[in-house]
Amino acid sequence: MSGTLPQFYSYFDLYNEQAFLHDAGRLRSETWNEWKDGIVANLTKLQFKAAWLYIYKRAKPLGEFEGVAAIWERIDFENGSPEAEDV
């Protein structure tokens, strides 16, 4: 996985930017819901999940990826979807 960490980091950075745009009210609800569904779909995949746990463990003390973390905390891994609609 170490060879792919930069690519995963870039994906998580993109996800975080998307969450920021949503939180800033700069996205339509429909757009955010589509993006969020894609984020959740990826975070429930084994490799994305492993990379997220590895990267976020190191990024959390720096206050990075808070938007992605908010989505992560609401994923119901048994069903692969957020528990709350308004993530």
Image (cartoon, rainbow, N blue to C red):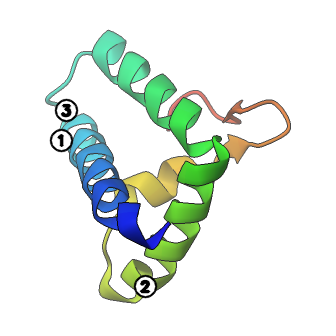
Q: Which mark is residue 58?
A: 2
Instruction: Measure the C-alpha gap from mark 3 to mark 1.
Output: 4 Å
Classify 10 Å Cα crowding around label 3: few (below 14), some (14-19), many (20 and above). Answer: few
Amino acid beneath label 2? Arg
Q: How many marks?
A: 3
Instruction: Measure the C-alpha gap from mark 1 to mark 2.
Output: 26 Å
- For numbered disc 1, what is the local secondary structure? loop
Q: Dot 3 corresponds to which residue?
A: 25
Sequence-first disc among 2 and 3: 3
Residue at point 67%, 49% (across, down): 46
- For numbered disc 3, what is the local secondary structure? loop
Q: Could you tell me residue 79's position as x and y percent? A: 81, 30
Residue at point 25%, 55% (across, down): 10
Sequence-first disc among 1 and 2: 1
Residue at point 43%, 72% (across, down): 2
Q: Dot 1 corresponds to which residue?
A: 24
Residue at point 20%, 24% (across, down): 27
